[in-house]
Amino acid sequence: MTAVDFFNNLVHSQEEITAQYQEEMTSYSPQIKKIVFEAENLSFHYPDGEPVLKNISLKIYEGEFTIIVGLNGSGKSTFAYHLNGLLKPTSGKLFVFGKDTKEKKNAAFIHRQVGIVFQNPYLQFVGDTVEDDVAFGPENLGLPRLEIKKRVDDALSAVHLTSLSNHDPATLSGGEAQAAAIAGVLAMDPECIVLDEVTSMLDHFSESRVLKIIDTLRERQKTVIFISHNPKDILKADRIIVFDQGSVSFDGTALEYIYSDKYPLPDITKLMRILQKENIDVLGAVSDPNDAAKELLKLLKNVDK
Ligand code: ADP
């Protein structure tokens, strides 16, 4: 072997080692997360309409809980429809687990990976009973009977609806109906669940019920995208994205969002920020009334001393 051959071999094996190392890092390191959604210069307009989404580029990672905020008409729902391929970009691309939503052959895969729940759950029901309705998706996947039963039972139990499984979905309360719609999506076992304004028609009690279901989805390590023009519990989010007239005007953590003082805040957070700006020693990043009460009680006890 000449010295040149020797070095060529050495370089080759170094490359192999590097490739192997990278592969190992990807498969074993929990820090390297898969990209679920990747939008590349995504723009969209409805037929003969004005641009609704303008040049959006972003990545959303596996297991992330993202809240998308924005005024009515800012393009949030239109973006949500792109996430499971219901709408396709007019220009640019959207990839789901690396698969282009514009390619027909990817449609079935994308529908299985991304479930969407909309504002009005009653429009989504297809079954005569809650159980039948939740079974509809897995039946369409052609799963064996036992597997369908297991998925339906599991999904209904996750949203605490087991006791209503034989009820007509049309007779459910708003919160129960939204829970049933989420169960229908859960039974498909998608990687990602998009919740589009699911709490905006609900009373306080039903809203809390749906927000608790989101905690369950997170425990199950689902990628959750919660779209709302008026989110309450923003501190639970890993990430907040603000849509403004079809563009992304902010993309960061909940703390960055709160302390930017540029965007709408839940009333509780607004109150804490006002006190903070008056140099009162409280946490500003509080979105739960119980935490706010603790902060204020601490303050009052100090005043007494
Ligand atoms: P958001 O969810 O933030 O309220 P939408 O995505 O629903 O925003 O709407 C963004 C813009 O697209 C609005 O100007 C709306 O009127 C328009 N739009 C929404 N749906 C349609 C449609 N099916 N056809 C034409 N224009 C639409």
Image (cartoon, rainbow, N blue to C red):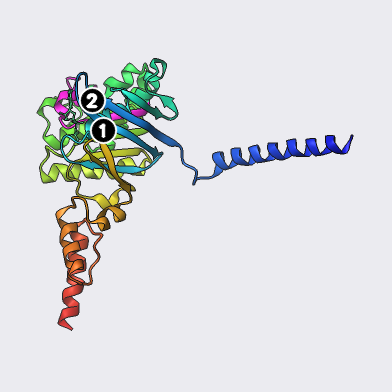
Q: The residue under label 2 is which amino acid type? A: Glu
Q: Magenta part of the protein: which range?
A: 113-132
Residue 127 is covered by the magenta coloring:
yes
Q: Which residue is mark 1?
A: 156
| Quadrant that contains the C terminus | bottom left
How far is the residue under mark 2 from the one under mark 1? 8 Å
Say which label, 2 or 1, has the lower sequence index. Answer: 2
Label 1 CB, ligand 1: below 8 Å? no
Label 1 crowd bin: few (<14), some (14–19), many (20+), radius 10 Å: many
Q: Quadrant of ligand 1?
A: top left
Q: Secondary structure at mark 1?
A: helix
| Left or right side of 171 for 9 | right
Q: Residue 196 placed where, x, y %? A: 22, 34
Residue 187 visible to an observer of this rendering: no
Question: Residue at the location (32% across, 17% down)?
Answer: 140
Residue at 24% in and 40% down: 243
State the residue at coordinates (32%, 18%): 139
Residue 195 sits above or below residue 239 on the image? above
Q: What residue is pinned by disc 2? A: 131
Taking the view exactly as shown, the residue that stands out farthest to the right is 1
Residue 224 picture location, percent across and down:
32, 39
Image disc number at residue 229: none
Element assignment for label 2: helix
In the rendered image, is residue 176 in sight? yes
Write down the quadrant of residue 190 in the picture.
Answer: top left
